[in-house]
């Protein structure tokens, strides 16, 4: 069973490149697929709700560092753009029988780049499982309409094309090289300053030496 590779977001393996998973051929085929579909055309991520009558849901993560007081971040989920990806995240935030983020770790903090969490199997970045259909570990890339254009955008960490599970990352700066490679599905709208506390944790090669835990999660009314 394929696992997740440390720094997979930035450094795809040679084997995946040879297989075309991350190569230019795949990239241009993806762009061609998006042509003609105005919904999927790449747009800068914007927290504004496109349809005021249908507000986007908001999920929260309560994070503790070394068992300290919980710090909350609130994420707006783009259910109008990537409904399946957002649904997977919602299920994992609401104690789905298929898995939950509660009491799992933020296992990677690459300062000034991103933080990664959501390994509901192993807690160290080597595993994960989707929460959409029982028995299906992965689900496909839905689209790449939203861009990693600023700090606080939330996207899927994957182990290859169409291999999204439960791991996700939060950008600490614009990461345009991930556009077309990873699916963005949300954005922090409250608690952005709490990312600074995560960045302050001492790490070795991205691995936090202090335990960072998602102590609670759910949906806001």
Image: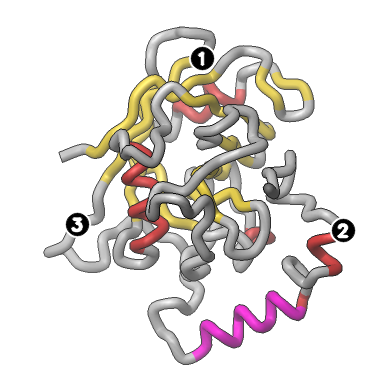
Is tag 1's residue or tag 3's residue first in the polypeptide sequence? 3
In 3D space, how far apart are the residues under numbered discs 3 and 2 (Cα atoms)? 42 Å
Tell me residue 122's x, y (percent): 59, 29
Which is nearer the eye, 115 or 176?
115
Magenta stretch bounds:
25-35
User: Is residue 190 visible in this depiction of the protein?
Assistant: no
Q: Which mark is residue 55?
A: 3
Residue lying at 60% horizontally and 45% vertically, measured from the top left: 173
Q: CA distance from mark 2 to mark 1?
A: 35 Å
Residue matched to label 1: 65
- Asked if one can make out residue 148 in the rendered structure from this viewpoint, the answer is yes
- Compared to residue 98, the image places residue 182 above or below, namely below
Please tell me in which quadrant of the rendered image residue 86 appears: bottom left
Point out the residue furthest to the front here. 135
Name the residue carrying label 2: 14
Q: Nearer the viewer, mark 2 or mark 1?
A: 2
- Relative to 71, is 158 above or below? below
Q: Please state the horizontal and vertical placement of residue 85, each as a whole percent of the image.
A: 41, 57
- Which one is nearer the viewer's eye here, 97 or 215? 97
């Amino acid at each position: 069973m394929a696992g997740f590779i440390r720094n997979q977001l930035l450094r795809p393996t040679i084997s995946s490149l040879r297989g075309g998973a991350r190569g230019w051929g795949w990239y241009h085929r993806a762009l061609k697929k998006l042509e003609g579909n105005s919904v999927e055309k790449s747009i800068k991520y914007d927290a504004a709700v496109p349809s005021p009558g249908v507000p986007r849901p908001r999920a929260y993560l309560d994070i503790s560092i070394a068992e300290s007081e919980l710090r909350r971040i609130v994420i707006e989920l783009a259910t109008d753009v990537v409904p399946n990806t957002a649904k997977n995240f919602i299920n994992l935030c609401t104690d789905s029988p298929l898995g939950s983020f509660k009491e799992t770790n933020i296992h990677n903090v690459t300062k000034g780049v991103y933080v990664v969490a959501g390994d509901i199997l192993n807690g160290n970045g080597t595993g994960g499982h989707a929460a959409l259909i029982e028995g299906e570990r992965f689900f496909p890339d839905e689209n790449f309409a939203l861009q990693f254009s600023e700090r606080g955008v939330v996207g899927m960490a994957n182990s290859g094309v169409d291999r999204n599970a439960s791991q996700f990352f939060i950008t600490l700066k614009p990461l345009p090289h991930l556009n077309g490679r990873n699916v963005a599905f949300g954005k922090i709208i409250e608690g952005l300053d709490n990312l600074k506390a995560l960045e302050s944790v001492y790490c070795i090669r991205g691995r936090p030496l202090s335990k960072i835990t998602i102590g609670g999660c759910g949906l806001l009314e």
